[in-house]
């Protein structure tokens, strides 16, 4: 068959694609970008498209999609229209569990490592198992292989979207049960019930392997099952809830000089009703949780009748999975580790393992919270989970499949942890967090990046910073050695601006910086003037096109996000700093019953960008609520009344000076907005309506929003559509088929691709309608 896999570059879907290739199927797939996983699939013969298009689906016999893909995804829509079956991963799992023996590993935490350990142990025992794991495993040579069909297939059985209930495993492991995925399971009872259904799918209760140390597992009431756990308890370890004797037990767990753990291994003889020592065992990985994972793997190997000598030897040398306590580098006395942990319990275990592995060293952790629903539901658990960190940076929420304000909730989480006595602070996006770490780390520190999103980039950016500094012979707190006065904050050299624009297009800025206060901004402007570097201020990058040739000076972003409300009865003055997301502050104000910003629901970008370009939609705009603007001209702060902005449609005095900078352009620091009291329920209804309308009108894909300003009394999008330009493509840029005033980056589009489309639109509309379309987007 020909399978088309949506999201093929992801860890889980790339693993499925590898298994399909092993079985002799034709595989194609799509993803917004290429990565190591997709490149490996291409090398094996798969066809991988960058970007998503209905055309990619044609010719496929079935489409496989991750649960995170929206129903309006263009390839799903095309599959339904063409009558191509749309499968979830659970559909494939069901088929595979009918074809061969399956070992399914479930649990809230530890599934990946336990699955990898089982496959490694079985290989060590002389078997050739199949495996499907949500991470690359160096000891196995990848994240999936079909193996010998006569040997078991080890599947990491994820509970998200209830996928694990599609399996009928011959043998199953449950590592622990702790409420997670609140977007799927609204409460802990529903979550536990799903695991009970999974446990019931195993016909032979002895083939159900359970962690005897876990209170959640104890609620399954399965005393006939096989159990594993740690005999000797530590004060920091969860309270044991024993249902039955442990079939596999570790005692005397201690850290080894090489960074792993050693312990005595015991096996319970159910016939003789007693334990017998199976010998001393070592693991290369640290932490009590990895001891438990190894015990689960040994229990599975024994139940399958494997050669235990080979299984034990293989586990002793197991190096772990990608992004599971993975050493990323050591430079200048600083050790950088990355871990996929994103649930409080996982983070607690990882930080405890770090203390065991690196006793006496300072632990500096960066946490990228994963999804709004999970962070909100588990907010009270985070303070205790982070107690092992000496310093904790909390980055923006990684939204994944959800929508929300990534900044406000991250601030709340950081404040909760700080209230528990941990030195915790909000650190912003990935680039900001890496820059902050530069000023924090000292030789001897252990830096751990935590999260399931792209937060591992923080550690890699930090290593890059430090390698430059160490190579230049300067202290770690300085990023670059310069022949002139050092800048007041770390600068990133040759920074691709594609990372900082919603179009995801743009060449390198000679220097890039992000500042968080007026003092930092003033110092940076003074430095740029002194050393003669041309400087441009940008906002959130949502209305910006940077040419692929880049910018030969300094591009800086102002990120300050404080706000305060002056309640005057029926009216109020909101003072809000320019780096604040405009949609986020609009939601906060409407929730408090203040009207005036509800039109900004879902509007991308920052308050500063909105003020600069007189943003507006759905009958409102900034000009209608703006009172005064706090502006820094050179290094002098000034308060401008709204009249001085000389607002016109999507334009202002400041925008013109920002597009054509002379020296250092003015910077919007903060704005005072006039609001009036209204009914919160009515405002919420209005916001919901606007959000719904925006969702239906906004095309899917990377764009800058509207490219052209609307001429008086006319619609640019309608004219472009009437001119027959909808769907026109140059390179990897396309005029949206959904909204003609959008240009979509299909994946890897260049600035020239976009500019060619812009020129073609302007020439065609001028020729057919005699109208000159002006750009709304800013070009650098």
Image (spheres, helix red, strand yellow):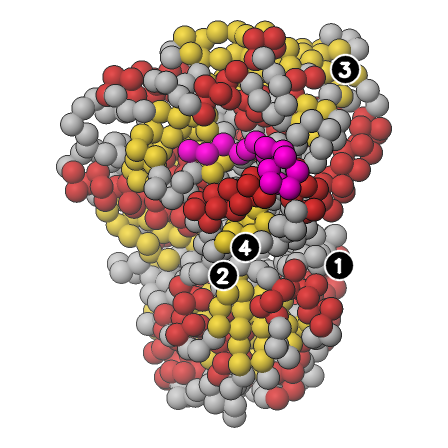
| Residue sticking out furthest to the bottom | 150
The earlier-in-sequence mark between 4 and 2 is 2
Name the disc covering residue 392, or none: none
- In this rendering, would 686 be left or right of 773? right
Question: Could you say where residue 114 lies in the image, as x and y percent from the top left?
Answer: 49, 69
* Residue stretch in magenta: 765-780
Q: Which quarter of the rendering shows the N terminus? A: bottom right
Q: Residue at x 82, y 34 (%)?
A: 685
Question: Could you say where residue 259 lies in the image, as x and y percent from the top left?
Answer: 30, 58
User: Would you name the residue on which mark 4 appears?
Assistant: 729
The earlier-in-sequence mark between 3 and 4 is 3
Tell me if residue 463 comes above or below residue 141 in the rendering: above
Q: Cα distance, mark 4 to mark 2?
A: 15 Å
User: Would you name the residue on which mark 1 appears?
Assistant: 190
Q: Nearer the viewer, mark 4 or mark 2?
A: 4
- As rendered, which of 693 and 527 lies closer to the eye? 693
**Callout 2: few (<14), some (14-19), or many (20+) C-alpha neighbours within 10 Å?**
some
Figure disc tally = 4
Numbered disc 2: secondary structure: strand
User: Would you name the residue on which mark 3 appears?
Assistant: 676
For the residues bearing labels 3 and 4, Cβ distance under 8 angstroms: no
Q: Is residue 530 visible?
A: yes
The earlier-in-sequence mark between 1 and 4 is 1
């Amino acid at each position: 068959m020909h399978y088309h896999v949506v999201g093929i570059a992801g860890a889980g879907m790339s693993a499925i694609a590898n298994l399909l290739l092993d079985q002799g199927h034709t595989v194609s797939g799509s993803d917004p970008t290429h990565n190591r996983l997709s490149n490996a699939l291409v090398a094996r013969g798969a066809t991988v498209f960058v970007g998503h298009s209905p055309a990619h689906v044609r010719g496929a016999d079935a489409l496989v999609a991750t649960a995170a893909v929206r129903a309006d995804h263009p390839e799903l829509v095309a599959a339904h229209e063409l009558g191509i079956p749309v499968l979830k991963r659970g559909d494939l799992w069901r088929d595979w569990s009918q074809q061969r023996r399956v070992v399914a590993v479930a649990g809230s935490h530890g599934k990946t490592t336990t699955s990898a350990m089982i496959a490694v142990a079985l290989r060590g025992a002389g078997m050739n198992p199949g495996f499907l794991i949500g991470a690359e495993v160096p000891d196995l040579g990848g994240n999936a292989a079909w193996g010998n069909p006569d040997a078991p297939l080890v599947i990491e059985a994820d509970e998200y979207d209830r996928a694990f209930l599609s399996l009928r495993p011959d043998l199953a492991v449950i590592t622990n049960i702790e409420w997670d995925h609140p977007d799927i399971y609204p409460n802990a009872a529903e979550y536990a019930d799903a695991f009970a259904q999974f446990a019931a799918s195993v016909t032979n209760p002895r083939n159900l392997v359970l962690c005897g140390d876990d209170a959640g597992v104890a609620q399954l009431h399965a005393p006939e099952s096989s159990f594993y756990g740690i005999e000797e308890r530590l004060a920091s370890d969860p309270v044991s809830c024993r249902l039955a004797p442990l079939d596999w037990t570790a005692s005397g767990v201690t850290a080894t000089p090489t960074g792993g753990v050693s312990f005595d291994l015991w096996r319970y003889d159910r016939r003789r009703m007693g334990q017998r020592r199976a010998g001393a065992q070592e693991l290369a990985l640290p932490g009590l949780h990895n001891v438990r994972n190894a015990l689960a793997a040994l229990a599975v190997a024994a139940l399958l009748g494997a050669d235990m000598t080979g299984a034990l030897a293989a586990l002793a040398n197991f190096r772990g999975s990608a992004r599971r306590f993975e050493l990323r580098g050591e430079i200048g006395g600083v050790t950088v580790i990355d871990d996929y942990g994103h649930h409080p319990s996982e983070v607690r275990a990882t930080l405890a393992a770090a203390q065991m592995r690196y006793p006496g060293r300072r632990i500096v952790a960066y946490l990228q919270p994963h999804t709004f629903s999970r962070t909100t539901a588990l907010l009270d658990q985070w303070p205790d989970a982070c107690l092992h960190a000496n310093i904790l940076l909390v980055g923006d929420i990684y939204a994944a499949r959800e929508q929300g304000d990534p900044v406000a909730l991250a601030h709340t989480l950081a404040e909760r942890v700080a209230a528990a006595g941990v030195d915790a602070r909000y650190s912003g996006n990935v680039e900001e967090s890496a820059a902050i770490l530069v000023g924090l780390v000292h030789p001897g520190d252990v830096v751990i990046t935590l999260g399931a999103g792209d937060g591992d980039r923080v550690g890699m950016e930090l290593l890059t910073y430090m390698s430059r500094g160490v190579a230049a012979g300067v202290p770690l707190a300085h990023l670059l050695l310069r022949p002139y006065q050092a800048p007041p904050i770390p600068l990133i050299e040759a920074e691709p601006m594609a990372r900082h624009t919603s179009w995801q297009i743009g060449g390198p800025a000679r220097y890039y910086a992000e500042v968080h206060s007026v003092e930092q901004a003033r110092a940076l402007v003074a430095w740029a003037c002194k050393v003669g570097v041309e400087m441009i201020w940008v906002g959130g990058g949502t209305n910006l096109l940077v040419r692929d040739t880049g910018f030969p000076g300094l591009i800086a972003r102002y990120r300050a996000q404080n706000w305060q409300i002056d309640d005057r009865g029926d009216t109020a003055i909101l003072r809000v700093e320019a780096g604040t997301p405009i949609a986020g502050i609009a939601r906060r104000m409407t929730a408090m019953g203040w009207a005036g910003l509800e039109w900004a629901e879902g509007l991308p970008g920052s308050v500063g960008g909105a003020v600069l370009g007189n943003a507006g939609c759905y009958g409102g705009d900034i000009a209608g609520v703006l009172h005064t603007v706090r502006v820094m001209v050179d290094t002098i702060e000034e308060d401008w009344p709204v009249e001085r902005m000389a607002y016109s449609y999507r334009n202002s005095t400041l925008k013109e000076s920002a597009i054509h900078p002379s020296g250092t352009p003015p910077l919007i620091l903060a704005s005072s907005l006039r609001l009036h009291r209204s009914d919160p329920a009515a405002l919420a209804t209005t916001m919901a309506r606007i959000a719904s309308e925006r969702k239906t009108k906004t095309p899917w894909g990377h764009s800058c929003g509207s490219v052209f300003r609307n001429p008086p009394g006319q619609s640019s999008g309608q004219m472009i559509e009437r001119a027959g330009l909808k769907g026109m493509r140059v390179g990897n840029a396309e005029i949206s088929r959904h909204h003609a005033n959008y240009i979509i980056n299909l994946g890897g589009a260049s600035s020239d691709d976009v500019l060619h489309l812009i020129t073609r639109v302007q020439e065609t509309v001028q020729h057919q309608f005699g109208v000159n379309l002006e750009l709304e987007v800013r070009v650098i």
